Image: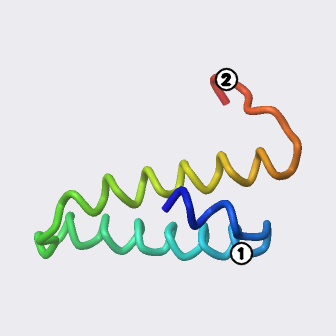
């Protein structure tokens, strides 16, 4: 995933972020209803979201605030 992020534009990063947020939402519903088979996927999606947010902030030239 990290190598894929290097070649993406900000618009592509934002689109990927929206896609992962939707997947995270669906995974939470599946877990709550007992239909989730691969529980590790939640962790992977959460980490991918963090990677994308970090890459987007770095591309925008901003600094990452601690505790925000």
Q: Position of residue 23 (x, y in %)?
A: 42, 73
Q: CA distance from mark 2 to mark 1?
A: 25 Å
Height in image: 7 above or below 67? below
> Which residue is located at x 65 percent, y 51 percent?
53
Q: Locate residue 59, reporting x and y percent.
A: 81, 52
- Residue 26 lies in quadrant: bottom left
Front residue (pair 52, 29)? 52
User: Residue 64 sits in which quadrant?
Assistant: top right
Q: How is the image coloured?
A: rainbow
Instruction: Classify residue 42 as left or right of residue 63.
Output: left
Kind of element beneath mark 2: loop
Residue tagged by mark 2? 66
Query: Neighbour class for label 1 at 10 Å: few (<14), some, many (≥20)?
Result: few
Place of residue 9 in the rendered image (x, y in percent of width and height, measured from the top left): 78, 70
Instruction: Read off the residue under disc 1.
Output: 12
Please state if 8 lies on the left or on the right of 62 as rendered.
left
């Amino acid at each position: 995933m990290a190598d894929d992020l290097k070649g993406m534009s900000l618009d592509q990063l934002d689109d990927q972020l929206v896609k992962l947020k939707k997947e995270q939402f669906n995974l939470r519903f599946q877990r709550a209803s007992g239909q989730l088979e691969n529980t590790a996927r939640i962790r992977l999606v959460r980490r991918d979201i963090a990677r994308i947010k970090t890459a987007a902030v770095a591309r925008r030239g901003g600094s990452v605030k601690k505790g925000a």
